[in-house]
């Protein structure tokens, strides 16, 4: 396929540091959700890269993760240059990550465009996704502009951030573009219902596009202390230097949404109906997976008797179920999870309890 010229200066920045606690016991500190193969034959991280590699070459893709995951990710992605996979020495949320990424890309290419992507999402329409990215990149080439790919809501959801659309700005590359009026984080259910019914809101899935230089300017304006640390790291040789490892833990722990996006005014949204899902729980995996005639999803061998609508994950043991309904059962060598599908969001709370109990052997 012919690659749109707008991607000549595009750099993928993949955020791959999450812990994925809601997928315990399969997800662990050194093998979190983004490294799991939940659908098909590729991990969520590999699928993220596969979506953008038709338009952004491997030598223009950067991955930021936690230091303990660095070697596992390098082994998983042997075709990606190892010096473009960075292990952060401390967990500081997305704002510091993107600040140092912007500095790295701006040093390499003053016209560099950052295409920021979470590593643990499903996008069912990748070709449309790439066309929408092309439109978003064209908008973001204008100095000072930031762009968010806004996701069409499919239900009132209290676990996502929302984007309020302002005036329609016209069409770019055949796609509608709107000015963004505001961001709202995780509203109450009644508010989320109003948002979805109004048709003026999109979900914020963390897919951002801007020039690296634009982001650095916004950090200088709205987060001068963080900008100062970024300059110190740059002066010492960048994110491959010892100074990066020494100074990074001094960054404030804050998301890019709170640090920058909620403060700036020159921001635009490209609506995207791309079959997006953040794969936030075992219940979501169940919904996205092929179910048998009894509504069960099974990963592993076994059989079910009078059992319906269960998620059964047992790679090694033969599992027989009798008379159970709407459960999640996940088995590993050292742990067994049994919960209702309805409560699968609470698996993360169980992991927090394991931490309090000092059961690091299970984390």
Image: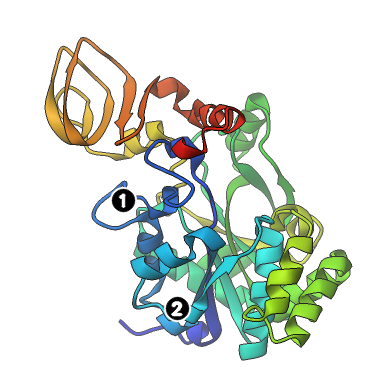
Residue 117: x and y in percent read 52, 62
Of the 4 image quadrants, the one containing the N terminus is bottom left
Residue 123: x and y in percent read 39, 54
Residue 135: x and y in percent read 53, 72
Can you see residue 142?
no
Tag nearer the camera, 2 or 1? 2
Q: Residues within 10 Å of mark 1 (few under 14, many from 20)?
A: some
Residue carrying label 2: 82
> What label does residue 37 carry, if any?
1
Tell me how far mark 2 sits from mark 1, CA to CA.
22 Å
Between 310 and 30, the one lying in front of the other is 30
Can you see residue 119?
yes
Please report the residue visible at 81 percent of the width from the left and 72 percent of the height from the top. Answer: 229
Colour style of the rendered protein structure? rainbow
Please report the residue visible at 76 percent of the width from the left and 67 percent of the height from the top. Answer: 266
Please report the residue visible at 64 percent of the width from the left and 74 percent of the height from the top. Answer: 101
What is the quadrant of residue 349 in the picture?
top right
Q: Earlier in the sequence, mark 2 or mark 1?
A: 1
Residue 257: x and y in percent read 71, 54
């Amino acid at each position: 396929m012919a690659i749109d010229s707008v991607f000549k200066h595009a750099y993928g920045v993949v955020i791959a540091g999450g812990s994925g606690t809601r997928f315990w016991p399969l997800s662990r500190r050194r093998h979190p959700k983004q490294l799991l193969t939940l659908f098909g034959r590729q991990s969520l991280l590999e699928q993220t890269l596969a979506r953008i590699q038709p338009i952004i070459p491997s030598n223009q893709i950067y991955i930021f993760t936690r230091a303990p995951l660095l070697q596992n990710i390098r082994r998983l992605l042997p075709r990606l240059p190892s010096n473009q996979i960075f292990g952060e020495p401390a967990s500081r949320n997305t704002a510091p990550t993107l600040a140092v990424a912007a500095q790295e890309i701006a040093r390499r290419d003053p016209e560099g465009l950052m295409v920021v992507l979470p590593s643990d999402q499903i996008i069912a329409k990748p070709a449309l996704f790439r066309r929408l990215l092309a439109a978003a990149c064209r908008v973001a080439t204008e100095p000072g502009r930031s762009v968010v790919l806004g996701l069409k809501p499919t239900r009132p959801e209290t676990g996502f951030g929302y984007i309020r659309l302002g005036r329609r700005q016209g069409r770019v590359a055949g796609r509608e573009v709107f000015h963004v009026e505001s961001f709202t984080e995780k509203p109450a259910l009644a508010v989320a219902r109003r948002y979805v019914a109004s048709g003026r809101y999109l979900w914020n899935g963390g897919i951002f596009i801007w020039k690296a230089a634009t982001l650095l300017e916004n950090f200088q304006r709205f987060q001068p202390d963080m900008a100062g640390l970024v300059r110190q790291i740059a002066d010492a040789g960048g994110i491959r230097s010892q100074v990066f490892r020494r100074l990074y833990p001094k960054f404030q722990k804050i998301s890019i949404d709170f640090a920058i996006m909620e403060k700036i005014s020159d921001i635009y949204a490209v609506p995207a109906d791309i079959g997006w899902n953040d794969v936030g729980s075992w219940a979501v995996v169940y919904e996205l997976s092929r179910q048998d005639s009894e509504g069960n999803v099974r990963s592993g061998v076994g059989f079910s008797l009078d059992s319906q609508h269960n998620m059964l994950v047992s790679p090694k043991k033969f599992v027989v179920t009798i008379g159970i309904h709407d459960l999640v059962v996940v088995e590993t060598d050292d742990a067994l999870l049994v919960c209702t599908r309805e409560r699968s969001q609470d698996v993360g709370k169980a992991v927090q309890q394991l931490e309090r109990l000092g059961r690091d052997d299970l984390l």
